[in-house]
Image (tube, grey):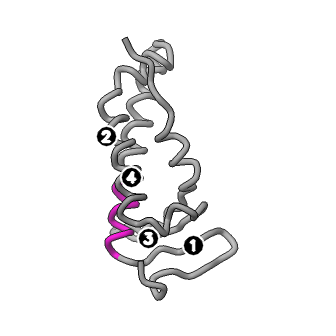
Amino acid sequence: MLLAGVAWSDEGIDITEPLEVAALSDLQERIDSISAAVTACTSSGKDHGDCLCENEEPILDFNRAVEELFETYSDLKTADIVRFRTSDGMVVSQSLSGIKNQAQMKLTCT
């Protein structure tokens, strides 16, 4: 990451480097998709754990994408809150420490 692509603010780090923004946007899309699928599943009356297991493959893909993000952009490993603007102009804030913790959780599906 180039230093010129980051601006410190009270709410976290503003990410402006296009490849990092694309990687963070991809993670956000994965989070939104998994969240919608699990919410729809639990809304149908199923147990949360069962719903996570029904979405095991997208969750594992997400976990790999998080690992790849931190391997590719190692400077983000120490960041907590980051903000970026999506291609459609929406400003997104992410807790990278929260995302990292989520990605380290292991599913116990049978």
The residue lying at 40 percent from left, 50 percent from top is 66
Q: Amino acid at mark 1?
A: Ile
Whichever of labels 3 and 2 marks the residue nearer the N terminus, that label is: 2
Q: Residue furthest bottom?
A: 4
Q: Amino acid at mark 2?
A: Asp
- As helix, strand or loop, the secondary structure at mark 1 comes to strand
Image quarter where the N terminus lies is bottom left
Measure the alpha-carbon separation of dots 3 and 2.
23 Å
Magenta residues, start to end: 18-26
Kindly identify which residue carries mark 1.
Answer: 13
Determine whether label 3 and label 2 are within 8 Å by CB: no
Whichever of labels 1 and 2 marks the residue nearer the N terminus, that label is: 1
Q: Which residue is more in the foreground, 40 or 15?
A: 15
Left or right: where does residue 95 sit relative to residue 50?
right
The picture places residue 37, in percent across and down from the top left corner, at 38, 31
Kindly identify which residue carries mark 3.
Answer: 85
Report the mark closest to the observer, 3 or 2: 2
Relative to 18, does residue 95 appear above or below in the rendering? above
Q: Residue furthest right?
A: 10
Q: Amino acid at mark 3?
A: Arg
The picture places residue 58, in percent across and down from the top left corner, at 32, 35
Whichever of labels 4 and 3 marks the residue nearer the N terminus, that label is: 4
Kindly identify which residue carries mark 2.
Answer: 61
Q: Residues within 10 Å of mark 3 (few under 14, many from 20)?
A: some
Q: Main secondary structure of the magenta part?
A: helix
Q: Quadrant of residue 21?
A: bottom left
Q: Which residue is more in the foreground, 34 or 97?
A: 97
Kindly identify which residue carries mark 4.
Answer: 27
